[in-house]
Each structure stands twice: as structure tokens, then as C-alpha cells.
Amino acid sequence: MKVIKVINNNNLCVTDDNGREQIVSGKGIGFGKKYGDIVDAGQIQKTYLITDSELQKKMITMLKEIPSEYMIFTNDIVEYIKETYPHTLNESLLVTLSDHIAFAIEQKKNGMEFTNPLLDSISEIYPAELSLGEYCVEQMDKRLGIKMNRHGAGFIAMHIINARLDTKMSDVYDITKAINGCIEITEYYYKKKFDRNAVCFERFQVHLKYLVQRLFQNKPLPETLSNDA
């Protein structure tokens, strides 16, 4: 790998043997380096392959501002999510989640922790994503010594949802509220509380998610509905 840009002492922009641009991290890997130098593969601890040029610029800025341990931690979390989550995720997840985790940790150290007003709705509508958020929170405690509450897991879940839908974070709020609102209206109409564990309710939720997400993304509805919602 050849150096094309020195970010700081611990991070470099490089090109690999195939000419692809990558960001590599390692303790002291950038010290004394300049354009065109060869990188010692033994010094590389993490490799970040980001194809979108704007995301790469954001990543470079974050590497200058965020402690490297937070970036490495988030990269490991994102890799775990990609391995266990059955849906395709936008590569922006690494960037947005790194920024969120670093911000959340700093706020926690300053004695502040936010509540997520949509936590209950996320728990009902996106249980798989919330479970991954809870895993991330557990790992933050184990690896970084930072204890976050379940609301923190809810915010991380929203970043996963955002990366899956390839949309704006504000849309994730609106989509979740819209789905929850549809359920409340239906319960009011039938004057009964639905059993959240029933198979029929799960199917109803799946179709609601599919419909609302399509509407927010301005995508036409196909003739045959899928379970991938």
C-alpha cells in the first residue's frame, strides 16, 4: 500500500495494489510518513474501505477529531452487525455510528444521558435492530467501560434502521411515529388492544412497515408484497 495522504500519526489514506483508496489505522502508522511512501502491513490494525467520496471526507475529518479507540470499537460493531443482520446496510453506518458513539460517550462523561421518546415504538416495530443496539451498549461497557442505558440502545437501533433504509435520520423518526400511529388508530377503531405476540399482529406490522417506508421513500408499491420490510 502507498500513502496518498497523512491524516495524523495513527491514520493514513492509502491505495492498495488494485488502486483502491482506503483508510488504514495503527499506532504511529503515520509518523514521519509522506506521499508515496510504502506502508508496513504489520502496523495496520484496522482498514476502512469507503467508496463514497463524501463519506470518505467525513471519515477523514472524524479520524482527526475522535479518539482512535472509539473508531476501532465502532468498526468492530459494524462488522458484527453486518455479519448477523439479514439486510443490506449503507456504508454510511460506520461514519454516522462512529460520530454518534463518540458524542454519546462524551455526554455520558459529562453526566448527561438522553432519553429516546420512541424507545417503546422501536421495541415493538424494530426488535431486531434494538437487540443489536443492546449488544452495542453491552460491548461499550465491556470494552470501553462506559455504561449506557436502554435509551442509548434505541438511538443505535435508529442508526441501523437509517442505514438499512438509506434515508435521513429524521425520516426514521417520522416512519416509526407513522407506523405506531397506524397501530393506535386501528386499535381505536376496533376498540381493543392487539396481542403483540400474535402471529397476525406481526404480519400486520410487517405490511405497515413496508407501506410506510415505501411512502417515505417515494417508491411505487409492487403488485406482490414482500416480507422484507
Image (spheres, helix red, strand yellow):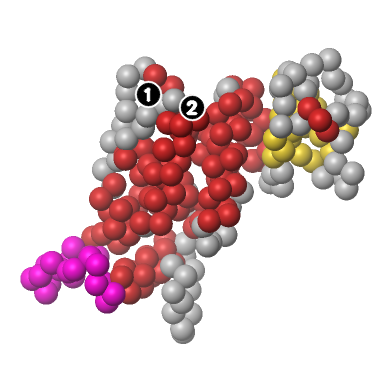
Front residue of 141 and 205? 141
Say few, some or many: other residues with alpha carbon within 10 Å of mark 1 (under 14 / 14 to 19 / 20 or more). Answer: some
The residue range painted magenta reads: 182-201
Front residue of 143 and 201? 143
Question: Label 1 is placed on what type of residue?
Answer: Lys
Say left or right for 62 vs 16: left
Q: Residue furthest front?
A: 142
Front residue of 60 and 17? 17
Which corner quadrant holds the C terminus? bottom left
Q: Mark on residue 144?
A: 2
Secondary structure under tag 1 reads helix
Q: Residue furthest left?
A: 191
The residue that appears at 31% across and 32% down in the rendered structure is: 114
Residue 81 visible: yes
Question: Label 2 is placed on what type of residue?
Answer: Leu
Say left or right for 170 vs 89: left
Residue 155 visible: no
Magenta span includes 184 = yes
